[in-house]
Image: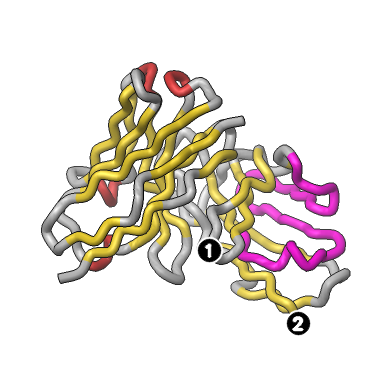
Amino acid sequence: QVQLVQSGAEVKKPGSSVKVSCKASGGSFRSDVLTWVRQAPGQGLEWMGGIIPIFHKVNYAQKFQGRVTFSADESTSTAYMELTGLTSEDTAVYYCTRDWGGSDYWGQGTLVTVSS
Amino acid sequence: EIVLTQSPATLSLSPGERATLSCRASQSVSTYLVWYQQIPGHPPRLVIYDASKRATGIPARFSASGSGTDFTLTISSLEPEDFAVYYCQQRTNRPPWTFGQGTKVEIK
């Protein structure tokens, strides 16, 4: 059984950065596709991109290109999502997911609030 | 970028009734289409993958069909736990893997 445990809620100032972690257990971390999805309050789901640790391959949605970085630490089975240049529009719950033909496992979500 | 349009935005039904949700793609996605269910305050749950295959643990009252640009998710007889928001997502080899805007199935 795969489990994804994310880091806790964050409050950030506009213009700053946030780094969210996602620790995986129970799966094949190195060869899994790990994706990041966000959901603004009361809104729908937005795919940010994904990473395959074994290939060091990342894919970013164009909307986030230049502002987001995905990384993975295989020694701790932890994935990271860093988003820079935060604005109020980045206030959202950020989810990591394990993707196997669909996102079949999700982290619990990390609320990032951007406020001055 | 492939745009997915879900309809209706809201479906008001009673328990026991049949729900039919639609997802239309702006260009063909073959069968690279999945459906998720989300209950407020919880992460989404995978319901259907490859357009028509039920994910692990999903009851048989959920079925789905379609290919190309038109897809349907059907819940044959709504149970209380089925009232939620449903999202479709396309997953072709042309990222981004976009989501539809969601259909809310609410109790009438």
Considering every residue shown, the one lying at the far left of the view is A15
For label 1, the SS is loop
The kind of residue on which mark 2 rests is Lys
Residue at screen point 82% across, 65% down: B78
Q: Are marks 1 and 2 in contact (CB under 8 Å)?
A: no
The kind of residue on which mark 1 rests is Gly
Numbered disc 1: what chain? Answer: B
Is A50 drawn above or below residue B46 in the view shown? above
For label 2, the SS is loop
Residue A55 percent location from the top left of the image: 36, 18
Q: State the extent of the magenta-drawn residues as a range.
A: B57-86
The answer to which image quadrant residue A61 occupies is top left
In front of the other: B92 or A89: A89
| In the image: residue A23, left or right of residue B74 | left
Is A111 drawn above or below residue A2 in the view shown? below
Residue B88 percent location from the top left of the image: 58, 53
Residue at screen point 74% across, 63% down: B81
The answer to which image quadrant residue A89 occupies is bottom left
Q: CA distance from mark 1 to mark 2?
A: 21 Å
Residue A7 percent location from the top left of the image: 35, 45
Question: What residue is disc 2 on?
Answer: B108
Q: Which mark is residue B41?
A: 1
**Does the stretch in magenta take in B71?**
yes
In front of the other: B63 or B108: B108
Mark 1 nearby-residue class (10 Å; few <14, some 14–19, many ≥20) = few
In front of the other: A33 or B71: A33
Q: Is residue B1 visible?
A: no
Mark 2 nearby-residue class (10 Å; few <14, some 14–19, many ≥20) = few
Q: In which quadrant is the C terminus of chain A drawn?
A: bottom left
Residue at screen point 19% across, 60% down: A12
Numbered disc 2: what chain? Answer: B
Foreground disc of the pair 1, 2: 1
